[in-house]
Image (cartoon, helix red, strand yellow):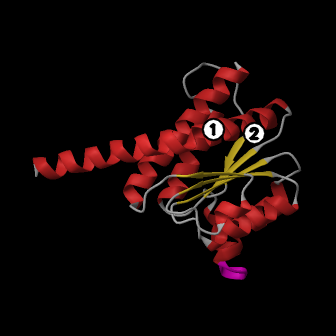
């Protein structure tokens, strides 16, 4: 058991080191996009499925509440939280449009759509990013594997270099926390 524990931790560390090596400029770019949007009183929209839905809520909470500094609330919304909207859209239309339809009603030019997908191929995240682009929003993808279809659709694609979902998600949270801290430091 202890050998497996060691292996899991070492794999997580290795993926984080590889992520740092390949994504440092892209993380800075994503943070700059978010900082510019917030300076211009625009909103951030986070969305994904499963663990990525939970991460969307986590990251939005860091902006609305606080990350490291006591400061004013920042406008961030997780599109994964309203069960009535999600189930109505899924039932009346299709699960594929649950994020794009919300962005159609809420998103404005200059806002940021932040899609999270470990595969980069989640259809509803793709639809959300496409809708955001059509609305003149900035788009960021926090992705894994090879970035999938989303990599080419996003203004900034943050692709964690791993094929293991758990390792991708662990590094994605580190990337998101880094962006939160960069934004707080720049704005406050």
Magenta span: helix, strand or loop, mainly?
A: helix
Q: Is residue 134 left or right of residue 16?
A: right
Q: How far apart are the alpha carbons under marks 2 and 1?
A: 12 Å
Quadrant where the image shows the C terminus: top right
Q: Nearer the viewer, residue 37 or 15?
A: 15
Residue 90 at what x, y percent from top left? 65, 76
Q: Nearer the viewer, residue 46 or 33?
A: 33
Q: Residues within 10 Å of mark 2 (few under 14, many from 20)?
A: many
Q: Quadrant of residue 80?
A: bottom right
Q: Earlier in the sequence, mark 2 or mark 1?
A: 1
Q: Residue at x 73, y 34 (%)?
A: 32
Mark 1 nearby-residue class (10 Å; few <14, some 14–19, many ≥20): few
Marks 2 and 1: which is nearer the front?
1
The part of the chain drawn in magenta is: 90-94
> Would you say residue 29 sits in the magenta stretch?
no
Numbered disc total: 2
Q: Which mark is residue 33?
A: 2
- Residue 25's label in the rendered image is 1
Above/below status of 47 relative to 171 = below
């Amino acid at each position: 058991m202890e050998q497996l524990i060691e292996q899991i931790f070492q794999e997580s560390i290795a993926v984080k080191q590889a992520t740092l090596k390949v994504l440092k400029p892209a993380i800075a770019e994503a943070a700059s996009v978010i900082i510019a949007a917030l300076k211009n009183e625009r909103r951030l929209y986070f969305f994904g499925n499963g663990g990525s839905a939970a991460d969307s809520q986590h990251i939005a909470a860091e902006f609305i509440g606080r990350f490291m500094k006591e400061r004013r609330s920042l406008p961030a919304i997780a599109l994964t939280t309203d069960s009535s909207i999600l189930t109505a859209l899924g039932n009346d239309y299709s699960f594929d449009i649950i994020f794009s339809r919300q962005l159609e009603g809420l998103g404005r030019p200059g806002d940021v759509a932040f899609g999270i997908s470990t595969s980069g191929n989640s259809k509803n995240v793709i639809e959300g990013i496409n809708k955001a682009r059509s609305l003149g929003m900035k788009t960021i993808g926090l992705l894994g594997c090879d970035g999938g279809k989303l990599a080419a659709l996003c203004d900034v694609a943050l692709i964690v270099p791993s094929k293991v979902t758990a390792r991708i998600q662990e590094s994605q949270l580190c990337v998101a926390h880094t962006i939160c801290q960069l934004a707080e430091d720049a704005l406050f």
